[in-house]
Structure formats: structure tokens, C-alpha cells
Image (cartoon, rainbow, N blue to C red):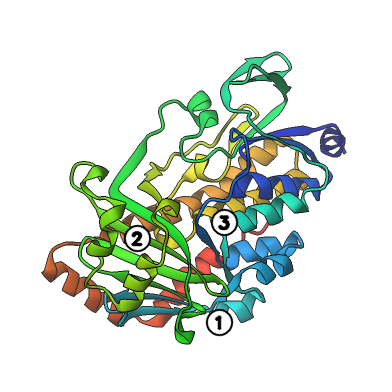
Amino acid sequence: RYHQLERKFMNIDIIGAGIGGLTTAIALEQKGIKTRIFEQAEHIKEVGAGIILANNAMQVYEKLGLRKVIEENGNPISSMNITKSNLKPLSKIDLSYFEQKHNTKNIAIHRGKLQQILIDKLKSNKINLDHKLTSIVKNENGYDLNFENGNKIQSSTVLGADGLNSIVRQNIFPNNSIRNANQICWRGVTEYELPVKYRNELNEAWGKSERFGFVQIAENKVYWYALKSFKKNKSEFSINDLHQYFSSYNSIIKDIINSTKKEQVNTAEISDLKPTNTWFKGNVCLIGDSAHATTPNMGQGACQAIEDAYVFSECLNKYSITKTLSEYQKLRLPKAHQVVKTSWIVGKMAHLSNPILIGLRNQMLRLTPSSVNRKQNEQIFQLAKI
């Protein structure tokens, strides 16, 4: 059949060697499709942050033969809790039901460790480092990819896996808008021995206009994140005062902050991409954050990129490139947008400052039946049928 012949000679260029780009390359390689990866960084370096691979992402890695190695290098999480600042639970999501249903665990792992596992899994692909894309120019045979280092590459199909500030997206859809949540986020990894009861849980403590989350990613290694709302700009807050911002929180949280080297903490503003209804133009297509960057409030940012990789490769195994692009968008867009919208609302709820509203919110969290939480997660953890 024609599309199988087309596939044999196809070469797909992936811009960005993050979790989404690497997973896509692995998924395509396993279908016999060649890819080239271009990454703007000069070196792949470990970012000091963790990542939670929820059940949907781990189902994909199971299909790609990566579940075991990821489990061996990470830490299983069987419960996700929202708590008050003193770590008293408000809402608890038991993940063991989904572990049994899909036969996969939720794994917390160091982001750099995951990236290395993915790089090691790629057989034929060399990652072209120090290749920062500057423009994509249409020509009669496809596209010219122009890079800052002076290289110019001819390409027939381009996948933009280059994140929230995607150059690929700016080239094909210049009118997309990034929304700022007016929240600053600090992320860190520290050597710390958590009490046993917290070792297989994600806990996120909600206060007033702020929150703090922590999870074990390996033995005596804890990944944590802290967020605060700002009025005008993020310079209202400093990493040096972090221990003061959370001084009224449970002593475990204060210990985690104090045990972390300040210079290893990553500081960023929280923003997302305003949902958009088109992810491709011609043979240039967006995946992961470049298509649907979300705020991190549901732990689904990377997981949604991993699902993109799976759906795109499965479609390309079945259809021509033209049909693949439209099917991929049709299958992935509603769910990805649902995550973006829900996450945005959760972020606003978590950062309420009015004590009466905080009281109502906490009451609502406490009274939400576990069946409602389960139903929400049921939809998120279900992979598309292709």
C-alpha cells in the first residue's frame, strides 16, 4: 500500500530533545520510521527537578518496553494528597485502583534520569546538539530548516517538540498567546530521609496564595516544588526568603527547604498556552508543550506529551502522513485541552487568598466523594484507541 511505501522513505525531523521529542523518536523508530533530532542546548544537562509519570504515561512506556527500567530508577506513588499547610489531608486520590486496572504504577523520577533512559533507548538516532532553530521556510520539496549555527537542513516533515516558547509554533502560528498565571515556582531536589508514611505519596500542602509539594524520587532523594502568587512581577519574591514564606508549614516542609542547596533551585514563572484548535499546517506539526503547554497543577504536562508520541506513531503506522496529522489532532486535542483548562482552574483554586473562600474550598475538597475523583482520573488515564 502507498502509505507503507511512503513510510519506508520517510524521514521526520523533530525539533527538541525533551521528554516529548525523545519519546516520539523512540515510538517512531520502533515502527521503522527514521527521525533526526535537533536540540538547541549544547549539552543535555540534568535539570534539578523531578517528574511524576502518571498511569497514562507509564502505559505508553510499557508499550515501548521502558516500564521496567523507569520503575527501577524511580519511586512508585500510590496516593496523591492535597493537604492543609500542617499536612492534614483535605483530599486523597488512591491510585492503587488504576495500578491494578492498567497493570502499571505511577512513578516519580528525576527528570534528568528519565531523559538519559530515553536517550539510551534510541538505537539509530544521534541528537544534533547546538541546533537552535531560527526559521522554517517552505520550498517545493518541503521545508528549509535554518539554524542559528548556520546549518540549513532540507526536511519533508517537521515535528515541533520545542516547548512553551516553541520556535516551530511561532513560525507556523504566530498569533498564539501565552497566558501568565502570575505565580512563581521554585523546584528543587534534595537529599532527605522522609518519614516512612510519606515515601510512596505525593503531598501538596495548600496555604494562602501559595502551596508546597513534595515526593520521593529515589532512596533518600526528594523532589519538591513551591509556588506563590505575585501581584506585579516575580521579583517581589526571592529564593533567599523561601524558608520564611513557608515558616508556618509542617516541620517536614521546613526541613526539606533548609536541606536544599539554593544554587540548585530552579525558579520560573508559571504560564500556559491559550488553547488553540489547530496543531499542524502542511507537514509541520506541534507535539507536547508546543501544542498544549499546561500549568503543572495536574502533573500531566509531560504525560500529555508522552501520549502525543504514542498516538502520532500509531497513526503513522496506519495512515499516510496527511491523514496522520488530522487523526492525531482529532484524537489528542480534546483531552489535552481538558487538562489545560482543568489545570488552570485548579491553580486558581489552590492560590485563593480570601479566608472565607479558602474555608469553602477546603470543605469542598473534603466532601468530594472519592468516586468523583476516580472518574476524573479514569478519563485522564485512558489512552486513545487507534
Q: Position of residue 192 (x, y in %)?
A: 47, 73
Could you tell me which secondary element the residue under label 1 belongs to?
helix
Sequence order check, earlier mark of 3 and 1: 1
Q: The N terminus appears in which quarter of the rendering?
A: top right
Q: Which mark is residue 96?
A: 1
> In the image, 364: left or right of 334?
left
Image coords of residue 332 (percent x, y): 56, 50
Mark 2 sits on what residue?
Answer: 226
Q: Is residue 97 visible?
A: yes
Most foreground residue, 377 or 227: 227
* Discs 1/2, front: 2
Q: Amino acid at mark 2?
A: Ala
Alpha carbon of mark 3 to alpha carbon of mark 2: how far?
Answer: 17 Å
Give the crowd class for mark 2: few <14, some 14-19, many >=20 residues within 10 Å: many
Q: Disc 1 to disc 2, how far (Cα)?
A: 26 Å
Mark 1 vs mark 2: which is more N-terminal?
Answer: 1
**Residue 277 x/y as whole percent:** 47, 39
Mark 3 secondary-structure assignment: helix
Quick one: quadrant of the C terminus?
Answer: bottom right
What kind of element bears circle 2?
Answer: strand
Q: Answer with the quarter of the image where residue 9 lies.
A: top right
Residue 64: which quarter of the image?
bottom right
| Disc 3 + disc 1, Cβ < 8 Å | no
Q: Amino acid at mark 3?
A: Arg
Q: Which residue is mark 3?
A: 111
